[in-house]
Amino acid sequence: MLRTDVTPRYAAASARPAAAFVCREQGIDMLNDLYHMLDPVAISAGPITIYWYGLAYVVGALLTAVVMYRTQRRWGFNITIDDLTSVVVGAVFGLIIGARLFYVVFYGGGYYWAHPLEIFATNEGGMSFHGGLVGGILGGIIVCRMYKLDAWTIADLAVIGAPLALCLGRCANFVNGELWGKPTDLPWGVVFGGTAGDMPRHPSQLYEAFLEGIVLFCILQALSRKKPLLPQGTFMGVFVMGYGIVRFLIEFVRVPDAQLGYLLGGVITMGQLLSLPLVIAGLALIIFARHRNQPQRVYLDA
């Protein structure tokens, strides 16, 4: 939703140096202007407030389900809508729980132990992809066992569409003005204001939205169309490794969480520390999948 009133976010932009306004007048600062026009609240009606961040999760889950369904049909399978819905719901519940718990444990810096009720304040942000991945996998496995679905193929199908959800999530991070990057003099720098200050910064959220969202989605889509079908686990491995590589690199232009800063003598962030195992695990999974060479199947009794 576009803002129609003057807000503190927009007012912060008006405090920038005069040189920044020259850039705006020359049409270079369009991304910054867009940021200051966007409201983190998507819908507000009386006591009901819906944030773009929450909508990103819902729409992302729906897009992932659509891609899963269309891909399995293209592969010649016929998973029922009920079974697919159950898998998506189970994975989403696991994702939300895992993402929040990982953030509390690895990024909270002890804050949530002193304020335990705020663990449930997910509308304020504070989710970890690494925890979401673990929780989503566990939630999906539980449902697969209940419905006698092959978890390997279901996971492969899920990660083909998952980058679209990641893209929307990172765009929501941008709208919220969180997870911003380091100061930059590049023409697409954004003044986020608040604790980010009045200097232009890398819109690192959008870098991630493009690389771990659009680019990774295109790669997985291309692989999903290869004939014969790639063996079980291949897509999961590519997704995990691809995300780990992108996240590790983006962390170089992204400001680490204030409560943690840089770790191991100031050479690495928590995001990089958690992403390195993903790169290794993803590569190992690709090698394992090729060695195992198990064909794709949706149901265990197929």
Image (spheres, rainbow, N blue to C red):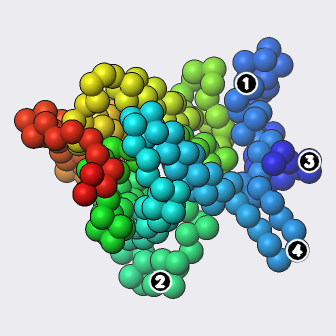
Q: Looking at the picture, does residue 112 appear above or below residue 219?
A: below
- Please give the name of the residue rendered at 9% of the width and 40% of the height, measured from the top-left corner: 292
Q: Give the CA distance from mark 2 to mark 4.
A: 28 Å
| Earlier residue among tags 1 and 4 | 1
Contact (Cβ within 8 Å) of mark 1 with mark 4: no
> Taking 296 as reference, is 137 above or below it?
below
N-terminal of the two: label 2 or label 1? 1
Q: Is residue 87 left or right of residue 34?
A: left
List x then y, in percent, for residue 8: 79, 54
Badge 4 is on which residue?
Answer: 46
Q: Amino acid at mark 1?
A: Asp
| x 38%, y 82%: residue | 113
Q: Quadrant of residue 285?
A: top left
Please report whichever mark, 2 or 4, sits nearer to the chain's N-terminal start: 4
Tell me if residue 150 can be seen. no
| 2 vs 4, front mark | 4
Whether pointer 4 and pointer 3 mark residues with C-beta atoms closer than 8 Å, the reply is no
Structural distance between the alpha carbons of marks 3 and 1: 19 Å
Q: Circle 2 is placed at which residue position?
A: 115
Residue at which label 1 appears:
29
| Residue drawn 43% across the image and 77% down it | 112
Badge 3 is on which residue? 4
